[in-house]
């Protein structure tokens, strides 16, 4: 009987030890409230990949210049004649007239921009008072002036008598520098000028084709 009890105890003890060993080697249970789903891949899905930013190629800005021959040169005083047309009338103490440049040369030339205009005592005299101010409401255009053809700009002359502080000096006419030129033309046209600085009697627009 004693021998049988010992064997039974050994079997029971051995079985219990085996169960404990298996429990230690197996996977541990997940803590309460923890998901057992596999971790999400770190690779971004196709929908999360940012699409390339669309780019727009800017269209060239429209310009006010017209086509002109590549071999044409700028219009210079040596191949131009100047005149004025005062039929534009006047208003509020101002006189409006057209400054007309005509191509007197044998080849076409390019005209673009504003003339420099001043009141002077004679064709070669220094400017009296302030030169003409540019009136920029008329757009600048670039165009070909064929031989015998003309272009015009508008001059406004404000009467010197409108300014109480004007120191009046007689002027024989207008000294005119074509755009981009250092040589000048002269139009005989008597006016009163103001010799003191700061008084602007003249304004000029950009040239336009006739």
Image (tube, rainbow, N blue to C red):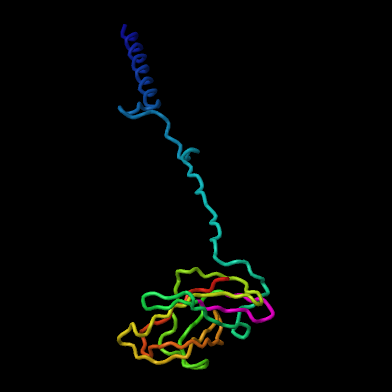
Residue 64's image quarter? bottom right
Is 53 in front, or is 7?
53
Identify the residue shown where x is 43% and y is 35%. 40
Question: Total of numbered circles in the picture?
Answer: 0
Q: Is residue 40 above or below residue 106?
A: above
Q: Is residue 130 left or right of residue 185?
A: left
Provide the major secondary structure of the magenta segment: strand
Is 51 in front, or is 103?
103
Residue 104 in the image: state x and y as whole percent.
64, 81
Is 205 in front, or is 168?
168
Q: Is residue 128 left or right of residue 80?
A: left
Residue 203's image quarter? bottom left
Please state the extent of the stretch shown in magenta in the rendering.
98-111
Identify the residue shown where x is 60% and y is 75%. 150
Q: Quadrant of the C terminus?
A: bottom right
Identify the residue shown where x is 31% and y is 9%. 2
For residue 133, say whether it is visible. no
Q: Quadrant of the N terminus?
A: top left
Q: Is residue 148 left or right of residue 31?
A: right
């Amino acid at each position: 009987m004693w021998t049988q009890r010992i064997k039974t105890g050994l079997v029971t003890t051995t079985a219990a030890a085996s169960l404990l060993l298996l429990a230690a080697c197996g996977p541990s249970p997940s803590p309460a409230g923890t998901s057992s789903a596999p971790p999400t891949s770190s690779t971004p899905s196709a929908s999360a990949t940012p699409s390339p930013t669309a780019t727009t190629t800017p269209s060239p800005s429209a310009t006010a210049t017209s086509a002109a021959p590549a071999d044409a040169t700028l219009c210079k005083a040596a191949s131009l004649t100047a005149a004025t047309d005062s039929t534009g009338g006047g208003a509020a103490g101002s006189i409006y007239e057209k400054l007309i440049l005509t191509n007197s040369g044998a080849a076409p030339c390019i005209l673009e921009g504003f003339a420099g205009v001043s009141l002077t005592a004679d064709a070669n005299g220094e400017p009296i008072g302030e030169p003409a101010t540019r009136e920029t409401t008329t757009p600048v255009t670039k165009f070909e002036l064929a031989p015998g053809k003309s272009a015009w700009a508008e001059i406004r002359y404000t009467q010197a008598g409108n300014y109480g502080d004007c120191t009046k000096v007689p002027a024989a006419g207008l000294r005119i520098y074509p755009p981009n030129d250092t040589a000048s033309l002269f139009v005989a046209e008597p006016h009163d000028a103001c010799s003191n600085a700061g008084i602007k009697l003249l304004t000029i627009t950009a040239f336009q084709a006739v």
